[in-house]
Amino acid sequence: MADLDDVQETKNYYTDVPQETEGFFLKGSNSYDWGMKNRLSRIFNPRSGKTVMLAFDHGYFQGPTTGLERIDLNIVPLAPYADTLMLTRGILRSNIPPSLTNSIVMRASGGPSILKELSNEDIAVSIEDSIRLNAAAMAVQVFIGGENESQSVLNMTKLVDQGTRYGIPTLAVTAVGKDMVRDAKYFRLATRMCAELGAHYVKTYYVEEGFDTVTSCCPVPIVIAGGKKLPELDALKMAYNAIQQGAAGVDMGRNIFQSEAPIAMIQAVRAVVHDNETPDKALDLYNTLRTS
Ligand code: R5P
């Protein structure tokens, strides 16, 4: 029975303090529902507004590439330094301890291998499985200008529709075919199309000329892929330049897990992304950490 004798009367209603309604920190994302914003806040750190996503989904079309031969040995030790893990559901279930609390961005498209036409992808994970695996976002490859451009764009819009039903954001990954020019004009087109058609954030590549125009006219956050392995200083410069020119983070794979000292490298990348550290200072950090 409820205890009615000792109920204290509430006295302070703070009638002179209006309840604040804070704006959401992420570009273009203020109109989403609570669950979607909460998932995005687990990918992008609300303090810095940025993310370090560790990408190791490469096996979904190219098998065990260099550095990804053993996820348990090569990748799991890096997880504490990443905001988000970008991976396939097969690797998540087989190799990633459920006790890890990183947010998960699930590779949700697939089909062809490197032996075939890569743009011929389909949606490869059901929305139910993404929910079951507690995904914070789903990632889909979009091949603007590619042989199967429309098919890949429609994969993305279908995922956006499915994810929106359950509050799960979609990351559009702009994939550049072998014959396409990687310049700001192309990436303005690709990223803007993805955003216009509903992607909640977009992954693209950094370009030396005009990257700020790519971020400026994309209405949702952009993160950059790392691309092929570069010398550590060059990779840190690329991340630094991208952040200074409006990127909201990195989705970096090979430049971390193929580094000679991956744990040191991911911490150096974090310093650039979250703390605006300069590439030279971040390289000093890398060198200190790798020898300690
Ligand atoms: C490639 O298609 C995958 O989606 C990777 O996640 C992406 O390319 C980022 O990895 P990296 O930094 O190695 O390019």
Image (cartoon, grey):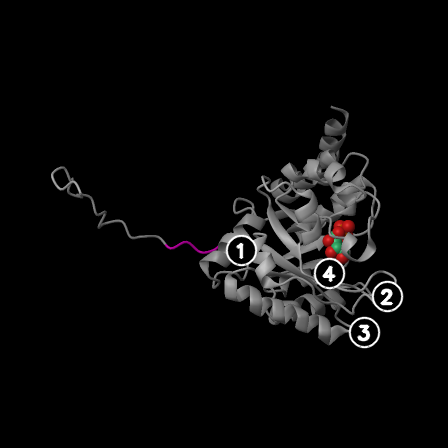
State if disc 2 and disc 1 touch (CB < 8 Å): no
How far across and how far down the image is residue 10, in percent?
18, 44
**Observer-nearest residue: 170 or 183?**
170
Highlighted range, magenta: 21-25
Asked which quadrant contains residue 67, the reply is top right
Q: Residue at x 61, y 65 (%)?
A: 199
Report the Cα–Cα distance between label 4 and label 2. Answer: 32 Å
Q: Is residue 246 visible?
A: no
**Label 2 neighbour load within 10 Å: few <14, some 14-19, many 20+:** few
Foreground disc of the pair 3, 1: 3
**Quadrant the C terminus occupies:** top right
Task: From the image, tell me which residue sits under label 4.
Answer: 210
Task: From the image, tell me which residue sits under label 3.
Answer: 147
Badge 2 marks a residue whose secondary structure is loop
Report the Cα–Cα distance between label 3 and label 1. Answer: 33 Å
Asked which quadrant contains residue 126, the reply is bottom right
Report the Cα–Cα distance between label 1 and label 2. Answer: 37 Å
Q: Residue at x 56, y 52 (%)?
A: 134
How far across and how far down the image is residue 59, in percent?
78, 52
How far across and how far down the image is residue 266, in percent?
70, 39
**Observer-nearest residue: 111 or 240?**
111
**Label 1 neighbour load within 10 Å: few <14, some 14-19, many 20+:** some
For residue 269, above or below residue 203: above
